[in-house]
Each structure stands twice: as C-alpha cells, then as structure tokens.
Image (cartoon, grey):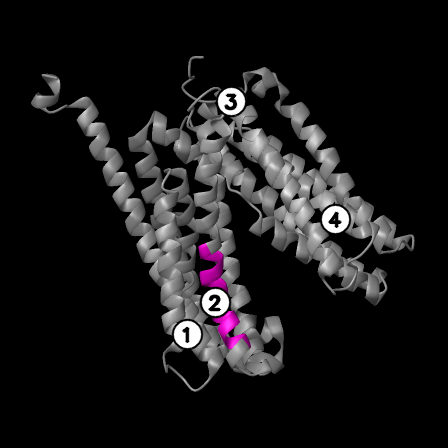
Amino acid sequence: MAVSPGPGRLVDAAANDRRLLSRSSLTVIGTLVSKLSLLIFLVIAARLLPVEAFAGYSYLVAMAVTISVLADTGVALVTSREIASARDHPGTLFWSALPAIMVGASLAGTAMIGLGMIDGGPGTGGLVLVLMGIFVAANAVLTYLLSVLRALGRFGAAAGLIGVSTIALVGASVAVAAAGGGLTELVVVLPARELLTVVVAMLMLRRDIGAPAQRRRGAWRRTLRLGLVLALASSLLALATRLPLLVVGNTGTVREVAYFSAPQRIAEATLVIAMTVGFALLPGLAYLRTAAPGRAARLLRRTLSAVAALGLIVTVVLVALAEPVIRVLFGDAFITASVPGRILFAGTFAYALLGTAWYALLALGDERRAVLVGCFGLVVAGIASMLPISGREDVVAAWSYLLALTAMAALACEMVRRRLAADAHAAAKLHHPEPSELLR
C-alpha cells in the first residue's frame, strides 16, 4: 500500500505555520473547556450531594485518574505520531495498534476493580466499582480515538467531541444530583458518557480508517515497545515532579506540607498548560518533520523562544507579587507560603520550557532521550531534597522542585537541539551525498 504524503486534513492544516498553530490551538481550547466544566461540576456537586456521596465520588474519580495514568502504555500517542508522519496508511496503523489498546484498556479496568476491592476508601465496593472499571477501560479507548482524530488533522472534531461530551456529562450529573440520586446513580453517568462518545468517535473515523482487514499482523508489538518506552519517560517525569512533595510529606510538619503544596499548585499549572500546548503541536510537528524538516525546526525554535519569553515575563510578575498572589488564592492563613512560593515561581519559565520541549522530543521520535531527561530530573530532585539548604522542609522541597525541573528543562532543550541538528545533517547528506557514497 503506497504511503501518502500525509493525512489530507493535516496537510491542509500544516499549509503554513499560522494555520497550524491556529488549528492546534483547538486542542488547547477543548482541553481547557473540559477541565473547567469538570471543576464547575465539582463545585456544584459539593453543594447538592450529601458529604458521604461527594467524598465517594471524588475519591473514585481520583483513583480512576491515577490508574489511567499508571496503566497508559503510550500506544495511543505513538500511533498518532506514526499516522501524522505518514509511516503507513492510517487504517493500517489504527487497526494494527488496536489490539494493544484493548489489552491495555482491559487491564486498566480490571486494576480499577481489583484495587477498589482491597481499598478502604469511600465508595469502593459493589456495582460502583464495576461501573468505574468500565469507565476506565472506555476512557483508554476514547483517548486513543481522539489522538487518531488529531493525527488526521481533525483538530476541531476532536475538540468539539470532547467539549460537547464533557458538558453533557456535567449536565447529566447535575440533573442526577439535583434529583436526589445517590453515588451509584451518579457513577452510572461516567461509563455511559465514555461508551457513547467512543461510538460517535468511531463513526467519525470510519471513512479514514477503513475496514479491520487492513490490520498488519505483529505490528502492534513494535508500537507497544515504543509506547512502553514513552510510558516509562512519562512516569519518570511524574515521579520527579512528585518527589519533593513526598519528601516533605514524610519529613516535614503538616503546616510545611501545606505551605509547599499551595504554591506548587500554581507552578504545576504552568507545567500542565505548557504540556497541553506541546501535546497540541505534536501531530503537526510529527508531520512536518517528515514532509518539511526545515519548517519543523524553525517552528519549534520559534515556539520555544516564544514560550521562554512569555515564561520570563510571568516569572518576574509572580516573584514580585508572590505574597499578594498567595493571599488572594489561599487566604491569610497561607501567607507563610510566600517564602517557598517565591522559590517555586522563580522557575516558571523553566516549567513552561520543559512542558513544550518534552512533547517536542516525542514529536521528533526521541522518547529514549525523554527517558534520560526524566532520570536526570529524578536524580536532581533526590539529591536536592537531602541538601541542608534551609531549616524549613517546605523551603527545601521548593528548592528541590525548582532545581529538578530547571535541570530537566535545560536538558530537554539541549536534546531537542541535538535532534534537530541530527535531522538537518541527515537531510544535508541526503541532498548532497559524500563522493564515496556516490560510488557505492
């Protein structure tokens, strides 16, 4: 089967940098709408539900999110990158990776039920666990389908689907809560929404992916291997960013944990937003790396430069206004948190660079170097956590977080530079081969 120069809609979206950035921004907007809608629902649910039901719902959702992250095999992202890069026909790549996706989804759902049965948290038992297991499994499949939609250049379709389905989820959940429904009735809405959205997504994809007969046997093993490397890199990144909190949680007082974790939420928000931007650009960068490597390099350099410049401005503002920002967001009781807050805010530009450069490495097919970045950050965080920097554990944790993520950002940017240089060298050799190569 001949390989096309790229998925038609993605080729159109990447016609110029402005159009690509505009289309990619739909992913960011859809993600923000989804998260904001869920936040609004939690605020409403806290007022409508009995305390026990709200506690059970919150605990189950947090547990499901944690299991979904840990059980992610990375296959969805790798496959979407392969589709965007036109490694093969989209249908062949889609159906070849689907077995790995289904196995991963089944394991994640089973893990949700199994861990829930031995967990003593609120709401963990009976039919609710089965429903949450279905929700986790369906969510893994939906994540895959949305990634494929974006890889095909259908940014608006993916953003619209997730946005509309999330708003519908919130509306249905609020209606159930307002009608006096209990935890079980509220949880039913979760898998129902996921399964319905999976069906709609499959209908949207059917013309692009064709029939299952296009599946290539054994291809899923290669995709799974790449995905597991990517999953390892993501796990190392998560550990590096969580280690300072784990250390202060075991060595500090309750107040020190609170004084560190409050401003860390702001720092982490910067990282999450930057990673969302990087994730949104991934399909376009993966395509351009194959179709127009020079454009991909220029776009990536401009994006990183813009992120660094904006990050520096935000850094200066947050450091200068650390005390009033923390007072407004968390109240006078947290004013002492302004000390670790200033330290954490000083790295805002680095957090922004790390999130963007991280997904740039993945778009460039360099997940192994992403593993090195994650390992490096974990080592730096561990060493910094043991240094006698201050008598306050929250301040030590803040320095540990700042040093680890700044080191990771510097290394990630250097890895991106090296990958772009290697790509440029390979392209130059292709167009101007050495005389010895011409004679072969």
Q: Amino acid at mark 1?
A: Ser
Image check: 4 left or right of 52? left
Between the residue at mark 4 and the residue at mark 2, the CA separation in whole angstroms equals 28 Å
Mark 4 vs mark 3: give the one in front. Answer: 3
Is there a contact, CB below 8 Å, between mark 2 and mark 1? yes
Quadrant housing the C terminus: top left
Front position among marks 1 and 3: 3
- Residue 127 seen from this side: yes
Residue type at the position of mark 3: Arg
Q: Residues within 10 Å of mark 4 (few under 14, many from 20)?
A: many
Mark carried by residue 132? 4
> Alpha carbon of mark 4 to alpha carbon of mark 3: how far?
32 Å
What element does badge 4 sit on?
A: helix
Disc number for residue 385? 1
How packed mark 2 is, by other alpha carbons closer than 10 Å (few <14, some 14-19, many 20 or more), is some
Residue drawn 23% across and 28% down? 427
Which residue lies under the disc numbered 2? 243
As helix, strand or loop, the secondary structure at mark 1 comes to: helix
* Pointer 3 residue: 217
Q: Residue 372: where, in percent of width, then height?
A: 35, 52
User: Disc 1 versus disc 3: distance between alpha carbons?
Assistant: 48 Å
Q: Locate residue 81: give its quadrant.
A: top left
Q: Is residue 237 magenta?
A: yes
Q: Which quadrant would residue 66 be assigned to in this image?
A: bottom right
Closer to the N terminus: mark 4 or mark 3? 4
